[in-house]
């Protein structure tokens, strides 16, 4: 449901200026829409402690995003995005030769962001940009403990918040098709604990 709402919101952002008036395509202003995929990695003290304790940790996954924006001039745009950062896990098992105890920890997060984008056109459709924004996110963490295959603990914790993010990237546009490479840092925080997510992504979009 959250993804449907986010997708509808993104579509609305593009549709409003695009269809509210008739105009001819202008390469330096107007709405755009796109999608990207990339590599998301998490830096978190609790996950690092599990790794030090001998857990098998996976602090990276494939991340996805949808984005929509409006460019007002060659140097300034606003952009909304929906992001799914994937899953991050930690697993461990111990045995006394007869009994086996295991623990599995999984965390996932997604969010809806809004950013101001500053662009610097270079030439022949190439440009570089920086962005600064806020993300409204929510995440879930699952902890499952089993002994000899029987579940003894199965808990779920949820958290949400609004935190800043920033990014830099490069873009190439030809015949209304946008191709991007970006790095973004999301500084999430909950109950005094920091969750820093780095997202390296490649995107393709269309300018209306």
Image (cartoon, rainbow, N blue to C red):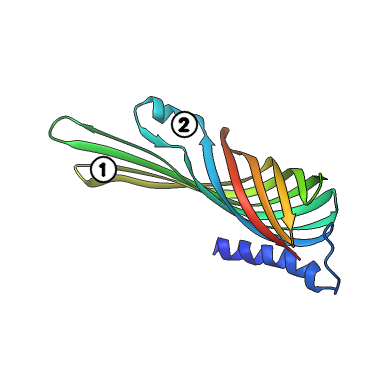
The disc at residue 146 is 1
Q: Residue at x 81, y 47 (%)?
A: 123
Q: Position of residue 165 (x, y in %)?
A: 68, 41
Q: Position of residue 185 (x, y in %)?
A: 63, 39
Which of the two residues, 124 or 198, is positioned nearer the viewer here?
124
SS under mark 2: helix
Q: Residue at x 38, y 46 (%)?
A: 155
C-alpha distance separating marks 1 and 2: 21 Å
Say whether residue 197 is left or right of residue 75: left
In this rendering, the answer to whether 84 lies above or below 193 is below
Mark 1 and mark 2 residues within 8 Å of each other at the beta carbon: no
Q: Residues within 10 Å of mark 1 (few under 14, many from 20)?
A: some
Residue that numbered label 2 is attached to: 46
Q: Quadrant of residue 47?
A: top left
In this rendering, the answer to whether 84 lies above or below 91 is below
Which of the two residues, 80 or 199, is positioned nearer the viewer here?
199
In this rendering, the answer to whether 81 lies above or below 120 is below
Say whether residue 68 is left or right of residue 44: right
Q: Position of residue 90 (x, y in %)?
A: 38, 38
Say whether residue 175 is left or right of residue 25: left
């Amino acid at each position: 449901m959250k993804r449907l709402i986010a997708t509808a919101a993104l579509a609305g952002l593009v549709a409003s200026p695009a269809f509210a008036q008739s105009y001819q395509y202008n390469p330096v202003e107007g709405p755009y829409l796109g999608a990207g995929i990339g590599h998301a990695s998490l830096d978190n003290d609790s996950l690092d402690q599990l790794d030090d304790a001998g857990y098998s940790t996976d602090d990276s996954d494939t991340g996805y995003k949808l984005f929509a924006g409006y460019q007002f001039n060659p140097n300034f745009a606003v952009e909304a995005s929906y992001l799914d950062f994937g899953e991050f896990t930690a697993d461990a098992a111990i045995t006394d030769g007869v009994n086996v105890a295991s623990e599995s920890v999984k965390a996932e997060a997604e969010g809806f962001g809004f950013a101001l984008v500053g662009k610097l056109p270079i030439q022949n459709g190439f440009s570089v940009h920086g962005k600064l924004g806020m993300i409204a996110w929510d995440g879930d963490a699952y902890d499952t403990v089993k002994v000899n295959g029987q579940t003894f603990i199965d808990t779920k914790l949820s958290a949400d918040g609004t935190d800043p993010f920033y990014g830099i990237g490069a873009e190439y546009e030809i015949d209304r098709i946008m191709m991007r490479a970006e790095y973004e840092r999301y500084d999430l925080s909950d109950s005094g604990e920091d969750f820093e997510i780095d997202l390296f992504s490649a995107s393709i979009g269309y300018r209306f």
